[in-house]
Image: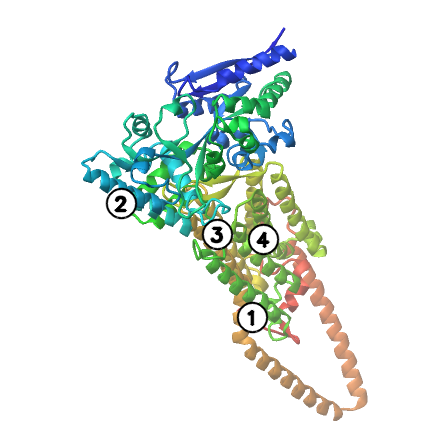
Amino acid sequence: WSLQLKALAFSRNADTQPYSPLIDQFNKYSNEQGLDITIKLNLLTSYNSTFSLSNFGTMIESLFKNKKNKYDLYFYDNLYTPRYGHYLLDLRELISKEVLNLYDKAIISKTCMYKDRLVGIPVQLSYSVLYSNHNLLKKYDKQIPTTWDELIETSKYILKKEQDANNTNIIAYNGLFDDSDQGTCSLIDFIYSCRKDSKSPYPKLISQTSIDALEMIKKLKNEIASDEIFSSDDYITASRLFDPEPTMIFTRFLIFQAPVKYLIPYTISALPGLHKGVTGASVCGFNIGISKMINKVNKEAAFKVVKYIASKEVHREFVKQELTTPFMPSLLEEKEICDIIDCPMYRSLQYTGREITKDIHDVDAYSDKFRKYIYEFLYGNKGALEVLKKVEDITKIYTISIHTEDSSVGLIYFIIYVVISTFMVVSIIFIFKEDFSPFFTFLSNDFWVIIVIGLIEVLSIDFTRFGEITVEKCHLRLFMLCTGFTLVLIPNLYKLTINFPIENKISFWSYRHPYLFLSLFIFLDLSFSGLSMLAPYEIENVFVEEGQNFQLCRIGSIFGSIVIWGATLYKILIIGVMLVLIFSEWNIQSTFFDMKLILSVVYITTLLTIITSILKFIKIRNYIMYYLMETSIFIIFTVSNYFLLFGYRLVLAFMMKQNIKSEYINNVCKNFVSNKSMDQSNNNSSKTNSETYQTNAIDKSNEMSNTYNDQNMNDHKMSITPPAKIPIFTKIINCHYTITSGIYNNNNNENSNNISGNEVNTFQ
């Protein structure tokens, strides 16, 4: 009995592919070692299928996505490492550090890693190099160039000499900037070759190095080539390379494997660089990876296969057979190897992977756009920086920031936030001043402070849009929105509750426990926020064609949507209750104008909530516009609510406080004069009559007071305690026409606008 593993591979050329020899060698090794493992290879080539490399890549991804366990091992193009990495096992636990350290670190990091996971091991690699016509160089006593300027100078010299000799078919440099993946690789390694020194990392797209690289490419095209030559595809270049009578001075192409490479009458060297000692070589080739979706038995067998293939002994054998280029640096020090291959040339290569596509899932689409935009400079009239900016925008996620590199909207928002928040915080001081306190008796001082804190919290929500959007920020945003809403509206709901004209248990309980009343709503906010974490947000990348990409928070499950809708309905219910209570208390004299202000707050809150809900169904493709619309809503909510609840009273206080002081002084003077006159009159009366008069007056006053209080209490009970069988709607209508508040608010209302016993209506 033998366990059979299935492997899938693709190669354009069946004669130079290493997969069949590799599988045959392992099957032989397995038989000798008694591993009871065999591998069956399904090799797709241009001879037995209509597949292209792109089609092959799509087929592999389709197998992964459909969770089909058709194959255990995959030989895949390292170009698609970001595309397949999610579906492949991490090999770091399988392959020892000693073996991994044998590989070139640059090759492993640039072609085999996916999100810090080793998802493949190289099997066959090839590098971009410079092919030089040694016959022409020897004829004109020229050296192989090491910089692009030397290449231009040498090419111009040889071109002129050959043209003078009537040889007009000569081509100086092919460029290979065609409309294929080879064109993308040519751009990648050319930009890499323009670094300042050999230790510099791959240049950023928006950098002077990248601009200099594009300018040098265009200089090469304009001075020693043409649009037609530079845009010729790899098939034309390959045919010229194999021409027995070489017609090119210099050519950029990949290294061929034996025996084909011996048919090429050119000398191979590293590509030139912008500076001496700097070069660039794109790494292309195939890795082997293990599918995540196979069973445990097959995984253990596949581990043994990969361990075998990853060994130095196997790699040495395949390099000796010239089925692959070397990617273990230590082999380049072995004489046996260097007798077969050009070790100094391989040691001079400075590798780069597909740096611009290493985190891109849809590599093919990105590669097409990358070439399209760069070629608008190379073959068109657009500027280097302009096209590099367009390339960057393909994948760049734009964020809001206080910095102004991309947009000043973040800085403007920050300034607005500081100004408004500072003003609101400073204004709290006035509620503790004697001149202003009569205008803020509708709520207690601590509730006014809580409202201002809530407004600042709502205004702060859009700071969660600053920087990269994360799941944590999405949940924080929901929490701030819920609690900010609560802190602004619930103190008003509390006042409406205890102000209700009809005596009831809820009003009584609320009157006795104001902070517990507020805490219950905050607890509900915390509950909804906590439940939302059970179905975390997802970060949605919004890609804009030739625009600026950005990110949004999206609910990724039905449960999450239910939680969000539940929180929304809970807030709508609060607004509904407030509207009913406002209607019920509309004609209460002591809070008549307060009701109008609170109603305005509720209307504005409802309107902004509706607008926000509508915007969620509109696809906005501009991240600045999206942010501005959202931020504007929060700013309008904050400013309008602050003015209606707090600022309006502050303005009245500044306008009326002198009148209140004058009225207070006048009342004190009148009382003083009245009391003095009465004292003089009393002195002219006899002591007995005075005592009798005062005793009778006190008795009469007490009798009248008791009678009045009894009557008032009876009237009050009649007005606030309607028969129990009256329908709720009728009770609300009766309350609507009531002009006095509930008994739990009477004392407060009677003294709320009173200065030393003299009532002052601050809203008149």
- Asked if the residues shown at circle 1 and circle 2 are in contact, with their CB atoms under 8 angstroms apart, the answer is no
* Mark 1 / mark 4, whichever is N-terminal: 4
Whether 48 is drawn above or below 525: the answer is: above
> Could you classify mark 4 by the number of other residues whose Cα lies within 10 Å: few (under 14), some (14-19), or many (20 or more)?
many
Disc ID at residue 326:
none
Name the secondary structure under disc 3: loop
* Residue bearing the label numbered 4: 484
Task: Identify which amino acid the numbered label 2 is placed on.
Answer: Glu
* Mark 3 / mark 4, whichever is N-terminal: 3
Q: Position of residue 133 (x, y in %)?
A: 33, 34
Q: Please state which of the two labelled residues, at mark 1 or mark 3, is closer to the viewer.
A: 3
Disc ID at residue 762:
1
Give residue 598's quadrant in the image. bottom right
Name the secondary structure under disc 2: helix
* Residue bearing the label numbered 3: 400
Q: CA distance from mark 3 to mark 4?
A: 22 Å
Task: Identify which amino acid the numbered label 4 is placed on.
Answer: Gly
